[in-house]
């Protein structure tokens, strides 16, 4: 909204709308349907903290202080816990729709950042996290997780959220993770190990090269920086991978109009 002039009437209406939303918050459920306005009770938004006990902060990621982050041993990844303040809208998306979520109290959002690969890039961390446990991320990964069965292949480890959820599913017998970055996998896998209920193999490599050589029941692809920009690449992977029965890519099922799951 920076730079957009607002009349006093509009500002009042907006204020009333948020007050109404905050007064009508409902408990979060990982199964709830996406709507453009999600109003959630903060106390019910329980997320998995990989390094419990870090102090949450809404300061820029490069200005965090000791005790507010954990960096990977090689220093290329940072795990931290973002502080999402009461009433501050957070973006959500579903297919080609956008919306917001507000919480009626402060909540914490674990997130994973990577340093830019380009050494001439002056930014210490990429602006967008690889993964953050926002309602939008949790809801848009859900359709893929619900497809998982038999031997499921997951491309893109991130914070291991989808891996943990997939491994909980009864129809899933084993999981293979394909992750590009060894530093990330060596750092995150031992931390999520206690949460994994199935045998998990990890292959370090580029999903575009590794996946066509694999056999499996379902491949879940979440290796894209932006929501919905992997449509054609998932389709190309599907065509190049005769040994895998079903494919899902982050954002693709909502884009094709598949019903909410
Ligand atoms: C959006 S995150 C995945 C988040 C994950 N779904 C979760 O639930 O935490 C993307 C991950 O894909 C990995 N990645 C990016 N490009 C890749 C590629 N070509 N092949 C394999 N992994 C890749 C990144 O290193 C990162 O770990």
Image (cartoon, rainbow, N blue to C red):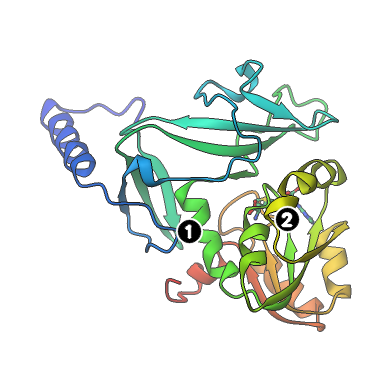
Where residue 99 appears, as percent x and y from the top left, is 36, 50
Q: Is residue 238 above or below residue 50?
A: below
State which tag comes first along the sequence, 1 or 2. 1
Give the distance between the C-alpha atoms of the residues marked 1 and 2, in whole angstroms.
Answer: 17 Å
Where residue 183 appears, as percent x and y from the top left, is 85, 41
- The residue that appears at 62% across and 31% down in the rendered structure is 80
Mark 2 near ligand 1 (CB under 8 Å)? yes
Quadrant in the rendering for residue 132 = top right
With 129 as the anchor, is 4 left or right in this view?
left
Mark carried by residue 167: none
Quadrant in the rendering for residue 252 = bottom right
Q: Which part of the image, by quadrant, shows the C terminus?
A: bottom left
Mark 1 near ligand 1 (CB under 8 Å)? no
Given contact means CB atoms under 8 Å apart, are the residues at marks 1 and 2 in contact?
Answer: no
Instruction: Identify residue for label 1.
Output: 139
- The residue that appears at 71% across and 24% down in the rendered structure is 124
- The residue that appears at 47% across and 29% down in the rendered structure is 83
Q: Is residue 250 above or below residue 75?
A: below
Q: Which part of the image, by quadrant, shows the N terminus?
A: top left
Q: How many marks?
A: 2
Dot 2, crowdedness within 10 Å: few (<14), some or many (≥20)? many
Secondary structure at badge 1 equals helix
Where residue 117 appears, as percent x and y from the top left, is 80, 35
With 158 as the anchor, is 227 left or right in this view?
left
Secondary structure at badge 2 equals loop
Q: Is residue 125 above or below residue 93?
A: above
With 211 as the anchor, is 30 left or right in this view?
left
- The residue that appears at 75% across and 52% down in the rendered structure is 193
Dot 1, crowdedness within 10 Å: few (<14), some or many (≥20)? many
Where residue 38 appears, as percent x and y from the top left, is 32, 51
Instruction: Identify residue for label 2.
Output: 156
């Amino acid at each position: 909204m920076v730079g957009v002039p607002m009349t006093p009437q509009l500002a009042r209406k907006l204020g009333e709308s948020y007050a109404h939303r905050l007064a009508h918050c409902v408990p979060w459920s990982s199964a709830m349907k996406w709507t453009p306005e999600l109003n959630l009770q903060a106390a019910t938004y329980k997320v998995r903290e990989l390094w419990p006990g870090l102090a949450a902060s809404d300061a820029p990621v490069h200005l965090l202080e000791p005790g507010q982050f954990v960096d990977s041993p090689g220093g290329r990844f940072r795990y931290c816990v973002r502080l999402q303040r009461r009433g501050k809208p957070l973006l959500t998306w579903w297919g080609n729709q956008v919306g917001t979520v507000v919480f009626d109290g402060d909540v914490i959002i674990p997130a994973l950042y990577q340093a830019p690969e380009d050494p001439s890039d002056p930014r210490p961390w990429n602006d967008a996290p690889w993964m953050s446990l926002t309602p939008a991320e949790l809801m848009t990964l859900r359709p893929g997780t619900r497809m998982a069965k038999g031997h499921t292949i997951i491309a893109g480890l991130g914070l291991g959220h989808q891996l943990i959820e997939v491994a909980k599913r009864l129809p899933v017998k084993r999981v293979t993770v394909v992750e590009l970055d060894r530093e990330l996998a060596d750092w995150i896998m031992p931390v999520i190990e206690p949460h994994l209920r199935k045998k998990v193999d990890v292959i370090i490599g580029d999903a575009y090269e590794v996946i066509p050589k694999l056999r499996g029941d379902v491949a879940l692809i979440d290796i894209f920086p932006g929501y919905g920009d992997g449509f054609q690449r998932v389709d190309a992977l599907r065509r190049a991978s005769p040994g895998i029965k079903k494919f899902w890519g982050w954002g693709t099922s909502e884009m094709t109009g598949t019903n909410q799951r």
